[in-house]
Every structure is written in C-alpha cells, then in structure tokens.
Image (cartoon, grey):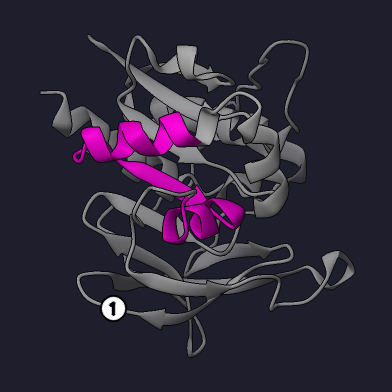
Amino acid sequence: MSMLRVGIAMLQGARHEHAEAVVNAAHQLELNVEIVPLRTPHDLMDGIDALILPGGESTTMRITSRHYALLDEIFTYIHEHPHIPVLGTCAGAILLAAPPEPHTRCIDVELTRNTWGRQRESFEAVVDVNLDIESFEFEGSYRPVKIGSYTPLMMEQQAAPTLNEGFPGVFIRAPRFCEISEPCRSIAMLENEVVGVQQNNIVALTFHPELTKDRRFHRWLLTQANVGGQ
C-alpha cells in the first residue's frame, strides 16, 4: 500500500492535534500516512499529497512565515498542483481567502476576523455538515503523534465527542464568512450561519475539527488524496 504524505504548516495553532487527527483518520480508513511538518520551503521539495493550514492568528502567521518564505512557497505549491486536497481551519481559512501577495485567492469568499468574539467567548455548538464522507464513531484506540519535541493533546480524553447527528463545532476567535461566490459552496451551517465552504478540492472551516473526536474532515482529506494518487 502506498504512503500518503500530508503536509501541515507548522506556523501556529493546533498543528499537532491536526497530525493526530490525520493519523487516526488514516487508521479508520486503513491507509498509510506520513506527516510532513512544513517549516521551510525545503520541506516541500519531496512533494505532498494533501495539505492542512491550521488555525492561529493569521497576521502573526504571515509575519512568522516571512522569515522562511514558507507561506509564499505553500501557495505557489497549491497553484502549481491544483488537484491537491487542502483543509484550512480558522486562520487557515482566512489565508485561503486572502493569501500573501502576489498569490490569488484559493476560495471565492470574503471573511471578517474574530467576529465570534474573543478567546474567553469561545464555544462549542452543533454544526450541520453536508460533506460527501461517512460519519461514524471510531471504537479503537487513539494514537497520539509526536512531532519533534511536542506531543498533542490526548483527543480520546479531551476532545469534543462525536455526535449521533451533526458535527461538534469548536469555535475559538472564529472568523465569519460574509460573502460567498460561485463556484464556492456551503458545506457546514451553524443554524443560519455558513461556517464551512468547499471549492473544488479545498475545504475552509471557521471552526476546529481537529479538537473533536469526529474525524470526518480529515477522512475527507485523505480520501481525496488517495483517489488523486491512484
């Protein structure tokens, strides 16, 4: 069985929790994955099959990345590999909508930052998801993943649980979609509010699926990468 290489931008946010989510999603799908931490442009030299842009503070991520030119290289890679599946969460969604110059946006949306409140006003809520991937509760053991000297949270103990109906949305200083244009479409709703969109092979969310036990979005990412690699 071939190995899928999943790149995770190591700038800010719950990148280690994303890594754990990817590994557990791969275990559910019986796929082999390699997590590729992206810290410098050199880390993209051997190629990746899927990409995750985690949350954080988008301005800080831009400033941090400038020293290594990482974001510039990431968006060059996205545009040169238009079929690569991409998952952007929170600040990652902002970067997909407004990448650093001279790159053009990857999703046809407008966002406003931090419109759901400050850090202390973070919340969990049930999100209605319309994504072409099966939802199920994984009954096996979860696998913490160590990247460098960091070990992620033990999701089995601390994550928002998988729900029988809906998705456990975790919102932390979340941005808001204020305008969506075709071919971008809504795939996640919080009551009447759009909180997730998809455009071709790119999914952008204003919430944090990596902080839940529901691996639906990470399974989608791996499924798309696996199909693309066949």
Q: Quadrant of residue 118?
A: bottom right
Query: Horizontal and vertical percent for residue 10?
Result: 62, 29
Q: Is residue 161 visible?
A: yes
Instruction: Based on the picture, tell me whether residue 82 belongs to the magenta stretch.
Output: yes
The one nearer the camera, 77 or 198, is 77
Residue 195 is covered by the magenta coloring: no
Q: Which residue is mark 1?
A: 181
Judge whether 82 appears above or below 120 on screen. Answer: above
- Vertical placement of residue 224 versus 150, above or below: below
**Image position, residue 22 (x, y; %):** 48, 31
Span of residues in magenta: 72-99
> Does residue 72 appear to the left or right of 16 in the view shown?
left
Residue 202 is left or right of residue 72, and the answer is: left
Residue 134 visible:
no
Q: Is residue 116 above or below residue 29?
A: below
Residue 230 rendering spot, x and y as whole percentages: 10, 23
The residue positioned 79% from the left and 68% from the top of the image is 122
